[in-house]
Image (cartoon, rainbow, N blue to C red):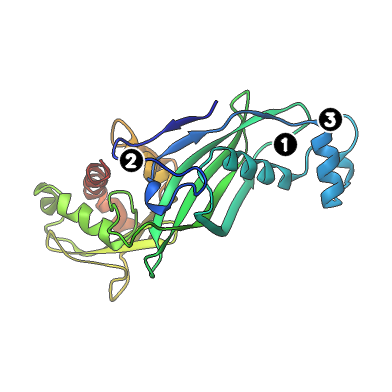
Amino acid sequence: MTTVQRPEEQQGAVDPARGRLFEDFVVGERFTSAPRTVTADDLAAFTRLSGDDHPLHTGPGAILQGPFGVAVAMGLLQSLGLHGAGVQGLLDTHWSYRAPLRVGDTVRLELTIVGCRRTRGGGRGIVTRHMRLVDDDGVVCQEGTTAALVTARGEGPDPVGRAFGTVVWGRAVVETLPPAFGGTLETWDGTVGLRCGDDEVHLRVYRGAVIDVSPRAPHGATFTLAADEVTWLELVEGPDNPFMRLAMTGRFTVTGDGYEYLRLTAALVQLADAAREVAR
């Protein structure tokens, strides 16, 4: 049976034939599909279809071809009932193969909405999904992100609290910073970049005040703090601020002046607190 976890603000009926429209998706939603067991017929059919009859895919203990997992993930995605005629096409797929799939394995799809961005025309949006194929032992066999172009119901405005790395999100974060933030930067002059996927926002700081929020500062960022969409979600959804743990384990990466980054650790924790508040 399919289970769905949705934020409290996401409400409203969805036409099953049309599926969801852009505004019906919320960053942070999670879905789990029904299980699917890999069969010998699956292996034979995919070998015949692909023409990939390498010895790895034959005989006892044969491993299913890697793209078979992508195909299964897409099928399980469709079984969730999220996508009908509102989806106009798949834009990209970034995929990793973590563990082999074999005949007899049972997998389910765990899907998280990690990005919702309206196109410039306003009539459509891009919905990015993080997808994991997980077996009965909890092992992630394959995972990745896919982005789909989805028809929009209107032209906005859209929620900004989880539009990580965008200018509107950056402005909301800055407006949420506590007065004490300026005290940690009262002698600092520079620019902090915050990046999520392909989106990056620059916060220009002068003597404790953020004086500009823009896609790019004139002289670039002093340093840029970057992470993927899943990491940003983990940052804002955890019970406590996990920024230091995520940074120390390499989930956040830094480019630019590493010394200045280390000097601003306290300020970055406050930025993370503000991002968590905005996301709520």
Check disc 2 and report the residue beneath it.
10
Above or below residue 139? Residue 192 is below
Q: Quadrant of the N terminus?
A: top right
**Residue at the spot x=38%, y=46% of the render?**
27
| Tag 2 secondary structure | loop
| Tag 1 secondary structure | loop
Q: Nearer the viewer, mark 3 or mark 2?
A: 2
**Horizontal side, residue 175 vs residue 27: left or right:** left
Q: Amino acid at mark 2?
A: Gln
Task: Return the x and y of residue 133 as percentages of the image width and height.
Answer: 61, 36
Separation of residues labelled 3 and 1 (CA atoms): 10 Å
Separation of residues labelled 3 and 2 (CA atoms): 45 Å
Q: Nearer the viewer, mark 1 or mark 2?
A: 2
Q: Nearest the camera: 223 or 66?
A: 66
Q: Check whether the beta carbons of the residues at disc 1 and disc 2 lie within 8 A of each other.
A: no
Check disc 3 and report the residue beneath it.
61
| Tag 3 secondary structure | loop
Check disc 1 and report the residue beneath it.
100
Mark 3 is surrounded, within 10 Å at the Cα level, by few (under 14), some (14 to 19) or many (20 or more) other residues, namely few
**Residue at the spot x=82%, y=38% of the render?**
43
